[in-house]
Image: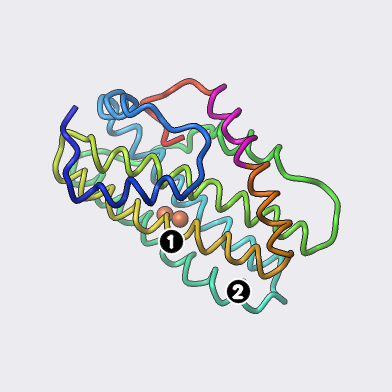
């Protein structure tokens, strides 16, 4: 494992701000690097899913002006991420293949509270999107710090910065539709639930989460 560069010190602080209750063991990067083709395929599909769920939000809540205005460019950005991952794969001689099962997102979906107002339902979706962004950001940060390949470190650094911005955007959007106190306490519940999910999943070198 390489030493962390001083310029990353600031980003370490920003990851603490993500509020994650269970940090990932940095040794996960060593396993991930051993199956780089696999992790890149999984990453590509994470970006595709991020773009797809953005589109779904717009289709489900077209009357929410701010949501549509902010999620539309996010969809384009996530699709841009998908293209970037494909490009990196091609450069390294890897090819896209079938989508992998995503246990993390499947379990996270179970945290969604059913019922309540339309706005409360929207907030559930926004917070889960924010949660996936926050954990992805944390994993990309580790890859950006500890990959032995300098080009990959730079590659993942860009994703880390971008997903951190998305995490903030989803949380801020949630506060547009439900009172701040409600959003804050619901966010804490989701963080707790997510930590339990992460604790129950094995570290895999072929999965981003
Ligand atoms: Fe992304
Ligand atoms: Fe994102």
Check residue 127 for magenta coloring: no
Asked whether, in this view, residue 148 is left or right of residue 85, the answer is: left
Question: In this orientation, which residue lies closer to the viewer: 175 or 37?
Answer: 175
Identify the residue position indicated by label 2 in the image: 68
Q: Earlier in the sequence, mark 2 or mark 1?
A: 2
Identify the residue position indicated by label 1 in the image: 165
What residue is at 58 percent from the left and 56 percent from the top? Answer: 53
Residue 25 location in percent, x, y? 38, 26
**Element at label 1:** helix
Using a 10 Å C-alpha cutoff, classify the residue at mark 2 as few (fewer than 14 neighbours), some (14 to 19) or many (20 or more).
some
Secondary structure predominantly adopted by residues drawn in magenta: helix
What residue is at 16 percent from the left and 34 percent from the top? Answer: 3
Using a 10 Å C-alpha cutoff, classify the residue at mark 1 as few (fewer than 14 neighbours), some (14 to 19) or many (20 or more).
some
Say whether marks 2 and 1 touch (CB < 8 Å): no
Which quadrant of the render holds ligand 2?
bottom left
Is 107 situated above or below 77? above
Asked whether, in this view, residue 105 is left or right of residue 76, the answer is: right
């Amino acid at each position: 494992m390489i030493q962390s560069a001083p310029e990353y010190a600031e980003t370490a602080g920003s990851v603490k701000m993500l509020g994650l209750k269970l940090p990932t063991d940095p040794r996960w990067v060593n396993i991930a690097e051993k199956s780089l083709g696999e992790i890149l395929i999984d990453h590509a599909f994470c970006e595709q899913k991020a773009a797809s769920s953005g589109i779904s939000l717009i289709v489900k809540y077209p009357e929410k002006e701010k949501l549509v205005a902010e999620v539309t460019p996010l969809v384009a950005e996530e699709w841009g991420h998908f293209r970037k991952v494909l490009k990196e794969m091609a450069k390294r001689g890897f090819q896209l293949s079938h989508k992998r099962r995503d246990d993390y997102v499947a379990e996270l979906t179970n945290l969604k509270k059913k019922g309540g107002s339309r706005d409360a339902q929207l907030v559930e979706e926004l917070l889960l999107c924010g949660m996936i962004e926050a954990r992805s950001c944390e994993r990309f940060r580790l890859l950006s710090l500890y990959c032995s390949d300098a080009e990959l470190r730079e590659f993942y650094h860009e994703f880390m910065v971008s997903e951190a911005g998305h995490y903030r955007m989803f949380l801020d959007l949630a506060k547009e539709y439900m009172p701040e106190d409600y959003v804050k306490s619901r966010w804490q519940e989701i963080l707790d639930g997510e930590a339990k999910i992460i604790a129950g999943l094995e570290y895999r070198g072929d999965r981003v989460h």
